Image: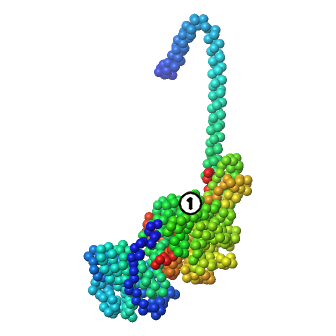
């Protein structure tokens, strides 16, 4: 070790030791008042109380952490209800297997959250004329609505709204854009 | 709304010349072949009209009036407007009445018809004489004198053009008709109305929501449309004259209104039962009867001109196709067999044909088919998506929307697919044109 390093070690080890010595001297002054015994007992009780507080604080922190995680999960599930759309084939309102899987999850969530009401929007791609697509969007919204109702969600909690081709998710004119636009979308009301 | 009312100025107009020698004597087909009126356009000369009195400032009004009349005739698709540069006669010195017209100089430049006009100005009022001549026979076909305020000149010209068309075809023209359409120029789709030629466009609805599918009642007094103003597609029925309005707002869709000829009743597609079906409603929105009873989409009805049948779209065979139903017997026949996506039927005013929109191989085009369903004819080709055919009230033109220039715009063509042109250019995209009936006041 270099000479400089030794100086550092001396500074960190020796100087705090000197400080400790000073504080010991102060305590002696206090004991001279004749309250030494009582002071010692009080100090033990304080220590126990502090430990208990710390334990409780840790528990509380743990609880909050779990609560936050739970809330996060709830928010995530709630967001998924709105963000996870189901998709259809061209000129069809038939529920594909993937769509049915998503709808089952949505139904489960709605069961667990009895107060939630949802609107189910039916959308189409731009192909075909807008009047026909309003009817097709209506059928798509109703297919999804009916599926959820069959899983036990009462009709009073679901409203079907067709938007036809009026609100595309992707404004493009490609097969990829059209696939994204042929969808049923859930909105919490 | 104000723009849709008849101006008080109409009362000022009166007819002076009304020579009746055409009564029963003139055969309309002589001039315009109704089998294909657009195959041979009639050459017509519209020299600048003459000032009988007035200042030099008025000569500009006269020039604009002459051009406007020529444009209006051109719009019909019946005529070939001759270039004024080739005329042999000086427009300010030529005769505008029979003994003074040198018909020879008009037949020499190829004109078969000649329109002359004489203007008199007095302050803000204006008196106009218009005459239409057959140059080969050397006779007047129709002559009228109108009086009104200067601002009414375009209306006066429309009135005389209607006389021209009536004298040549035996049917009234479209010059008092309007076209309703949808435009998103304001940021939302709203209903607009313009004159038959695209002039004077004005916004009719202020819903600030998606608003679609305008439809005119047979008398032109009511308009029905679908709007999301309450968050879902409801049907609104509005009287344009007195502001009365009614709403059809069942759960599901309330769309595709179609007014019945001769009666204040309309069809609409409703889905409150869970299925999209066509219903007959009163003008207040009460259900008279349900017309379709078929699991699956039934939508987009259009009346036959006698009000006895409807054409509509149904998916009952697996793909959207056009069907025809007798309203009393509910008997249904399929109309379209060619193609896999045929929608938006529009029955012609003459009753013999049905226009519709067909989508095939990614292209969307307007077709016309006889009511026997045979020999569909494609009217638009290779020019973007073409949708929403709507017949002019005289049955000679079809308005439609097209994306041929990028954003959707309203276009007009003859019923044979010729003379396709844009009707108007305003901001945003335009779609869903609906041609009004002739104004009954004219």
Task: Kindly tell me whether residue B403 is visible in this rendering.
Answer: no
Report whether A88 appears left or right of B380: right
B87 vs A135: above or below: below
How crowded is the residue under tag 1: few (<14 C-alpha within 10 Å), some, or many (20+)?
Answer: some
Viewer-closest of A27 and B352: B352
In depth, the one of B48 and A42 nearer the eye is B48
Could you tell me residue B149's position as x and y percent? 35, 74
Residue pictured at 45% horizontal, 87% vertical:
B168
> Residue A40's image quarter?
top right
In the displayed structure, would residue B136 be above or below residue A76? below
Q: Residue B416, position in %: x, y?
A: 51, 81
Left or right: B245 in relation to B315: left
Question: Tag 1, which chain?
Answer: B
The residue indicated by pointer 1 is B228
Mark count: 1
Give the image location of residue B205, x and y in percent.
50, 63
Which corner quadrant of the image does residue B11 belong to?
bottom left
Q: Name the one closer to the observer, B156 or A146.
A: B156
Q: Secondary structure at mark 1?
A: loop
Determine the image quadrant of residue B152: bottom left
From what the image shows, is residue A43 above or below residue B126? above
Name the residue rendered at 69%, 47% in the picture.
A114
Of B212 and B51, the residue lying toward us: B51
Q: Residue at x 65, y 27 (%)?
A: A56
Q: Is residue B131 visible?
A: yes
């Amino acid at each position: 070790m270099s000479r400089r390093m030794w100086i550092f070690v001396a500074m960190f080890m020796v100087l705090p030791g000197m400080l400790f010595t000073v504080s010991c001297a102060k305590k002696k002054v206090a004991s001279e008042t004749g309250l030494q015994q009582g002071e010692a007992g009080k100090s033990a009780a304080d220590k126990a109380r502090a430990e208990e507080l710390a334990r409780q604080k840790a528990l509380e922190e743990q609880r909050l952490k779990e609560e936050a995680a739970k809330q996060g999960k709830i928010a995530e599930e709630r967001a998924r209800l709105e963000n996870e759309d189901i998709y259809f084939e061209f000129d069809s309102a038939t529920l594909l297997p993937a769509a049915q899987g998503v709808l089952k999850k949505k139904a489960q969530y709605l069961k667990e959250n009895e107060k939630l009401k949802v609107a189910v929007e039916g959308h189409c791609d731009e192909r075909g004329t807008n009047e026909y697509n309003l009817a097709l969007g209506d059928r798509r919204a109703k297919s999804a609505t009916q599926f959820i109702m069959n899983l036990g969600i009462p009709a009073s909690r679901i409203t079907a709204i067709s938007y036809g081709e009026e609100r595309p998710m992707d404004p493009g004119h490609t097969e990829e854009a059209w696939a994204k636009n042929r969808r049923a979308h859930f909105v919490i009301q | 709304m104000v723009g849709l009312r008849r101006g008080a100025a109409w009362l000022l107009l009166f007819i002076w010349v009304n020579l009746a020698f055409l009564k029963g004597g003139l055969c309309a087909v002589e001039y315009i072949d109704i089998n294909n009126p657009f195959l041979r356009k009639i050459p017509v000369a519209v020299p600048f009209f003459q000032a009988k009195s007035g200042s030099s400032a008025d000569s500009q009004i006269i020039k604009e009036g002459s051009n406007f009349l020529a444009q209006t005739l051109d719009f019909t698709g019946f005529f070939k407007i001759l270039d004024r540069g080739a005329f042999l006669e000086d427009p300010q010195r030529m005769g505008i009445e029979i003994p003074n017209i040198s018909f020879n100089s008009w037949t020499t430049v190829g004109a078969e018809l000649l329109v002359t006009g004489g203007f008199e100005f007095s302050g803000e009022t204006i008196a106009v004489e218009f005459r239409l001549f057959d140059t080969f026979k050397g006779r007047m076909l129709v002559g009228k004198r109108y009086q009104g305020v200067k601002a009414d000149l375009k209306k006066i010209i429309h009135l005389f053009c209607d006389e021209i068309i009536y004298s040549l075809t035996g049917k009234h023209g479209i010059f008092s008709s309007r076209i309703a359409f949808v435009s998103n120029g304001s940021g939302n789709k709203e209903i607009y109305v313009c004159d038959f030629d695209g002039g004077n466009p004005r916004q009719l609805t202020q819903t600030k929501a998606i608003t679609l599918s305008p439809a005119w009642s047979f008398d032109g007094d009511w308009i029905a449309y679908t709007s999301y103003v309450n968050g879902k597609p409801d049907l609104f029925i509005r009287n344009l004259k007195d502001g009365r309005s009614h709403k059809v707002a069942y759960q599901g869709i309330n769309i595709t209104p179609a007014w019945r000829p001769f009666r204040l009743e309309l069809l609409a597609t409703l889905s409150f039962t869970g299925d999209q079906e066509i219903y007959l409603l009163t003008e207040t929105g009460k259900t008279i009867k349900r017309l379709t009873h078929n699991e699956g989409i039934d939508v987009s009805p259009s009346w036959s001109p006698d009000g006895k049948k409807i054409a509509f779209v149904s998916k009952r065979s697996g793909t959207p196709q056009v069907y025809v139903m007798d309203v009393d017997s509910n008997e249904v026949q399929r109309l379209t067999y060619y193609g896999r996506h045929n929608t938006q039927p529009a029955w012609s005013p003459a009753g013999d044909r049905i226009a519709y929109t067909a989508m095939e191989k990614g292209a969307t085009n307007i077709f016309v088919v006889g009511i026997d369903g045979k020999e569909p004819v494609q009217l638009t080709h290779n020019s973007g998506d073409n949708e929403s055919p709507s017949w002019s009230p005289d049955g000679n033109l079809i308005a439609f929307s097209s994306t041929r220039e990028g954003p959707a715009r309203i276009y007009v063509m003859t019923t044979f697919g010729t003379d396709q042109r844009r009707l108007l250019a305003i901001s945003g995209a335009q779609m869903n044109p609906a041609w009004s009936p002739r104004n009954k006041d004219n």
